[in-house]
Amino acid sequence: MRLAYGCMGLDDVDRADEAVRTAYEVGIRLFDHADIYGGGTAEIVFGQVLARHPGLRDEIEIQTKCGIVLGGAEGGNAYDLSRAHLLASVEGSLERLGTDRIDRLLLHRPDPLARPAEIADAFDVLTAARKVGAFGVSNMAAPQLAHLRSAVRQPLDVNQLELSLHHRDLIEAGVLVNHADAAAYAPVTGTLEYCTDHAVTVQAYGALAQGRFTGRPRGPEDESTATLVRRYAAELGATPEAVVVAWVLKHPAEIVAVVGTTEPHRIRACADAEQVAEAMTREQWWSLWTAARGKPVP
Ligand SMILES: NC(=O)c1ccc[n+]([C@@H]2O[C@H](COP(=O)([O-])OP(=O)(O)OC[C@H]3O[C@@H](n4cnc5c(N)ncnc54)[C@H](OP(=O)(O)O)[C@@H]3O)[C@@H](O)[C@H]2O)c1
C-alpha cells in the first residue's frame, strides 16, 4: 500500500490507539515519526499503544527522523547531523517507542555543518548494533542526497518531501523550465527524477494538504479547488480526501503518501487513494493542478 501514517499529531494514548488501529485496519503498515514530534510525546504515546497490542510491533514498520534540535539556536531551531547527535537521538527514540529497533531512520533536514564521514560512521554503528534497519533522508534536493549517498555505506532509499495539491514545488519545477517563475523552484529541480533513477522512494508529507480542499480551507483561494475535488469525488465514487491524496499518487514515481490526520473517519477516507489514482483521468489530474495553481501552465 502506498500510504503511510504520519504520527506527528499523536498526543493522547486512547486517541492514538484508535488512530493506529484504524490505519492498520485499512492496510497501512508504515508509521512515520520524528524525535521532535510533540517534543517526544508522539513517540511516547505510540510506544504505549504498542505495549497495549503485543505482536503489533512485528507487523509494522516504524520510521523515525532525527537531526532537528528544537530551540537549538537563540531565536529558533538548529539542525544537527553530527555523529554524537545521531547516536543520542536514536537512543532517545528507542526508549520512547519502547522498541529495540527502528526500521528506518531519516535525516530530517540538511545540516550545513554536517560531515558526511561522521554520518557514515554513525550509520555503521547503528547498523552493527541492529538498532536501525535502513536509512533515508528528508527535505533534501537531489545533489544533497547524491552527496550523502557517496559517503555512507548503506543505501539511502527514501526521501521524504512535502508534496501535495497545495505544495506542488516538485511538480512545478518539472514544467517551469525556461520560465520566469522557474527560479522559485530551482532547488528541487530534478529531485523527483533523481529519486526515480536511483530507486529512492519519495514519501510525500502533507499529502492531504492539511485539509485545505476537504473541509478546512485556509482562504477564498482554496474554494475553487475544493469544489472541483468534490465534483471529481462524486464522479469517481470516492471521498474528497482520497481524491486529494490520489493527485499525488498518480505521479509515475510510485510515491508513498504520508497522511497525518488523527481522526479515524479521515484515515478511512484516505484508504482508497491508490485505486482512485488509477481511476483518475489525465484531464481530472491536470484540472486539479490548474485549479490549485490558480492559473494555467505556461
Ligand atoms: N519530513 C518532514 O519535515 C515532515 C514535516 C511535516 C510532517 N511530516 C509527516 O507528515 C505527516 C503529515 O503531515 P501534516 O499533518 O502536516 O499533513 P496532512 O496529512 O496533509 O494533514 C493532516 C493535518 O490536517 C488536519 N486536517 C486534515 N483534513 C482536515 C479537515 N477536513 N478538517 C480539519 N482538519 C483537517 C489534520 O487534523 P486532524 O488530525 O484533526 O484530522 C492534521 O492536523 C506528519 O504526521 C509527519 O509524519 C514530515
Image (cartoon, rainbow, N blue to C red):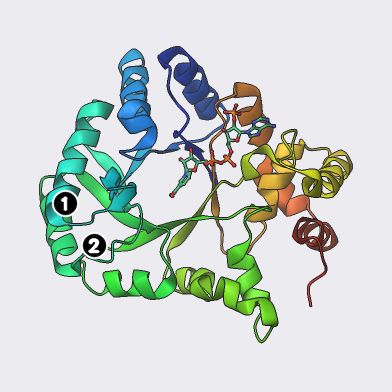
Label 2 crowding class (10 Å Cα cut-off): few <14, some 14-19, many 20+?
Answer: some
Q: Residue furthest front?
A: 75
Q: Is residue 60 visible?
A: no
Give the image location of residue 289, x and y in percent.
76, 60
Give the image location of residue 234, x and y in percent.
87, 39
State which quarter of the image contains the C terminus: bottom right
Residue 49 vs residue 93: left or right?
A: right
Residue 216 vs residue 71: left or right?
A: right
Give the image location of residue 285, x and y in percent.
78, 59
The quadrant in which residue 282 appears is bottom right
Instruction: Please state the quadrant of the image where ligand 1 appears.
Output: top right
Q: Circle 2 — which element?
A: loop
At horizontal 30% and vertical 74% (from top left) the residue drawn is 147
State which quarter of the image contains the N terminus: top right
Do the residues under discs 1 and 2 have CB atoms within 8 angstroms? yes
| Mark 1 → mark 2, Cα distance in angstroms | 9 Å
Q: Earlier in the sequence, mark 1 or mark 2?
A: 1
Q: Is residue 95 visible?
A: yes
Residue 59 vs residue 152: left or right?
A: right
Give the image location of residue 154, x and y in percent.
23, 62
Q: Nearer the viewer, residue 11 or 156?
A: 11
Residue under circle 1? 127
Q: Please, what is the three-letter code of the amino acid marked with disc 2?
A: Gln
At horizontal 71% and vertical 34% (from top left) the residue drawn is 216
The answer to whether 231 is drawn above or below residue 288 in the figure is: above
Residue under circle 2? 154
Q: Which mark is residue 290?
A: none
Q: Circle 1 — which element?
A: helix
Q: Nearer the viewer, residue 255 or 289?
A: 289
At horizontal 58% and vertical 55% (from top left) the residue drawn is 163
Label 1 crowding class (10 Å Cα cut-off): few <14, some 14-19, many 20+?
Answer: some
